[in-house]
Amino acid sequence: MALTIGELADIAHLRLRLHAGALGLDATVAWAQASDLDAPWQWTTGGELLMKNGCTLPAAADAQIRLLTGLAEHGIAGLVIGMDPQTPPLHSSAIAAADALPMPLLTAPYSVPFAAIGRAVADASKAEEGRRLALTERVYTTIRRSVARPPRPEAMRHLGRDLACRLAVVDAETGDPVLDGADPVPPDLRDAVIEEMRHRGGALPGVAHIDVGGERAQLVEVPDEEPTVLITYGFRAAPPDIVLLQHVATAAALLLAQQGIRREHQRRVGGELLAHLVDGRLDDAEGRSQLAERGLGAQGCVMLAADGGSSAGERYVHLSLDRRRIPNLLLHRSGLLYALVPASGDAAAVIQRRLGEDAVIGVSDPLGFPGRAAAAVREANWAVRDAANSPTRISHYADVMHFSVLRDADEAQLLVDRVLGALLRYDAEHGTDLMRTLDIFLRSGRSWQQTAATAGIHRQTVVYRIHRIEEITGRDLSATGHIAELWMALRARDLVAGRAVSS
């Protein structure tokens, strides 16, 4: 049977001395925990006896009171201070605060190790330890069952019943449940979780404690590809200890991994559907039907093209979108990631966040009907090449105003032939790379030195090539009008190159 603080204080060989908080001597000690942290309750769940070295006890009266108040607010059963030569005196105001809370405040002689106190608590808690082991076994029974067959939505509800509390696994940014079929958490608790995670910058200690309308809740991190939190609330008995909570978090992570396997299968099937749409292998009726099954309507969809960023992050883009209930089809082709997603919402921002700050994203006009998928790919390709010039690194085809006169690839091809045709033929006949030099030169703000560094050639070679380009194209690269014409022709050539991607 677990000890009370009073029973622990009566164990002669421990030589504990009570200084304050006598009204709390009936508190039961679930565990003995040593900590020298300023906020030790971030690593406890309640019911612990905290043991603290005297040299780490705050010297100021107000700091001692804050420590005692924090311990009481987070359900710590009592505080033992190990006396050593550097222990500051206990202020009378702190002793008075401990009496008022009440927070049992004891001291242990320098010669008594904390291990002796911990052993006394453990020996008295053997029966409770058997219950804890039984609960842990139930957690891992849930894990074994989830491996053997698809996890059921009530798995966490069953664990919550065993732990005499309610459990929820939610997204750390939105507070929404992430396990299929799970019930949403109460709105006030959801808002409190979002605010707590925002306040902590998304990082959790062992346990974070929040108060919602006078009711306690605890947050524990769940290891997953997306920031995820396990919430315990609605306690019908003492809260689960931190070790047990970590076991539950592990079970939640495995349930998410099993769910992720199903999501990966859905992503692959969706990629095949998008490839069929882009390649024109589905008629409009069949295309609309299959899009509707995926929660996508052609009228309200756009095509995104993403370039750059983290290749590791790309593997989990579908999970990020699914977390936010954004229907999607994903396809990796010709070095770009394509996504068919609803035009409304924040799909582009979600994808960019997952890929990283180096990623650029182009957004097509609305799809309209399935047969326009190949054109939407070309539009996204055009927009993604402009995205590097956008402060947000996201560009919309409809907003690239300097290309608005070219509404399709056929018009773009006419411009390329007229402005760059002679240069393209010269490169093809002589095995030169003047087109690339021109593109680098204009992208580099007509800097000779930067162009040379980017192209890996001597500065004087750049000067020679630019003069040769002017001769072949009949354009003067010091004239604003000619520069604008060449720049537009180069970007139109990018659009035309998108045909190969969609074919």
Image (tube, rainbow, N blue to C red):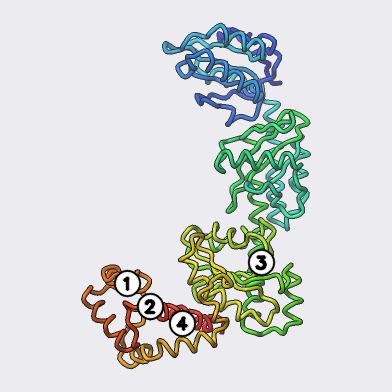
Give the amino acid type for the residue marked by disc 4 in the picture.
Answer: Arg
- Name the front one of labels 2 and 4: 2
Going from N to C along the chain, the mark reached first, 4 or 1, is 1
Q: Is residue 259 left or right of residue 485?
A: right
Q: Is residue 74 visible?
A: yes
Q: Amino acid at mark 1?
A: Arg
Residue at point 65%, 32% (across, down): 241
Q: Which mark is residue 493?
A: 4
287 over 135 or under it: above or below: below
Q: Position of residue 468 (x, y in %)?
A: 27, 85
- Which amino acid, by three-letter code, is at mark 2? Ile
| Residues marked 4 and 1 touching at CB (< 8 Å) | no
Total marks shown come to 4
Task: Return the disc, 3 or 1, that comes first in the chain's sequence.
Answer: 3
Q: Which mark is residue 343?
A: 3
| 3D distance between C-alphas at marks 4 and 3 | 27 Å
C-alpha distance separating marks 3 and 2: 35 Å
Q: Are marks 2 and 4 in contact (CB under 8 Å)?
A: no
The quadrant of the image that shows the C terminus is bottom right
The numbered mark at residue 446 is: 1
Neighbour tally class for label 1: few under 14, some 14-19, many 20 plus, Cα within 10 Å: some
Left or right, 69 with respect to 306, comes to: right
Residue 483 is labelled as 2
* Quadrant assignment for the N terminus: top right
Secondary element under disc 1, as helix, strand or loop, is loop
Which of pointers 4 and 3 lies earlier in the amino acid sequence? 3
Compared to residue 432, the image places residue 442 above or below, namely: above
Secondary-structure class at tag 4: helix
* In contact (CB < 8 Å): disc 1 and disc 2: yes
